[in-house]
Structure formats: structure tokens, C-alpha cells
Image (tube, helix red, strand yellow):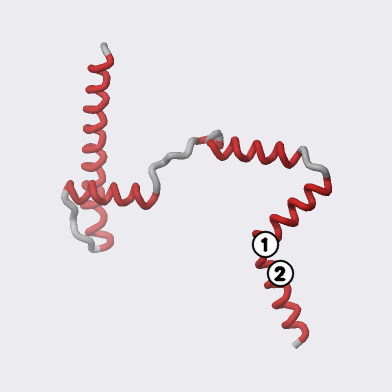
Amino acid sequence: MNKGVKFILFVLLGIVFVFALGYVTQYLWNWLMPKIFGLTTLTLLETFGLLLLAKILFGFGGKTGGGKGKNWRWKKKMFQRYESMTPEERQHFKNRLKEKWCKWEEKSSTATDNDLKA
């Protein structure tokens, strides 16, 4: 098959998949939600809107499995950078992270010190 036919076939299969997903979601919603929660039934168009809203709110699944995505390369680079530091540089790095992200520890320790004094 040439590329044009494959492209058209791919688009048609995508449309069929979207309608099948919408129909299954509509069927499950109309079967379960009115009985369980007393909600109204949905039309197919409302179901597509609900699916789109869910994708917007919960994401489009862009992460790759197994930790091999962009984050893995960033973590690997940071780990190599940390490994090449001297012990003094590591301690300085840890202190900077602690100052930036662990401010709650200082507040909780001062609160307990004040409680003990009273």
C-alpha cells in the first residue's frame, strides 16, 4: 500500500476508535451513574465533552513508561554532577536545598521550643 492509503486508513481507524470510546463511555455512564448517584443520562455529544474535559483535567498521558523519559536524563545528569562534587561542595549543596525546601522544620522546632518554655 502507498502512503496516502495508509494515512487515510489510519485517520478512519482513529475516527472509529474515538466513536467507539465515546459509545462505551456513554453506555457505562448511562448504565451506572443514574442508578448509583441519581445523575441524568448523557447523549453521545455530551459524552465527547465529558471525555475532553477529563483529558484536559487529568492529562493526555505524555509520560513514557519505565522512567526512560526526559526526567530520567535530567536525574542522571544531576546524579553525575553530584558524584563529581567534593565533600564540601556536597554539604554546601545539601544546605542550600535544605534552606530552600525545608523551612517547615525550623518553624516546627521553634514551636516546640516555645511550648517547652511556657
Asked if 43 appears above or below 102 in the picture, the reply is: above
- The numbered disc on residue 102 is 1
Percent position (x, y) of residue 23? 21, 42
- The numbered disc on residue 10 is none
Label 1: which secondary element: loop
Foreground: 55 or 33?
Answer: 55
Q: Residue at x 21, y 38 (%)?
A: 19
Give yes or no for contact between labels 2 and 1 (Cβ–Cβ under 8 Å).
yes
Percent position (x, y) of residue 31? 22, 51
Q: Residues within 10 Å of mark 1 (few under 14, many from 20)?
A: few
Task: Say which amino acid is labelled 2.
Answer: Glu
Q: Which residue is mark 2?
A: 106
Most extreme residue toward the bottom is 118
Taking the image as shown, residue 118 lies to the left or right of residue 29, namely right
Q: Residue at x 23, y 42 (%)?
A: 22
Instruction: Locate the N terminus by quadrant.
Output: top left
Q: Residue at x 18, y 48 (%)?
A: 45
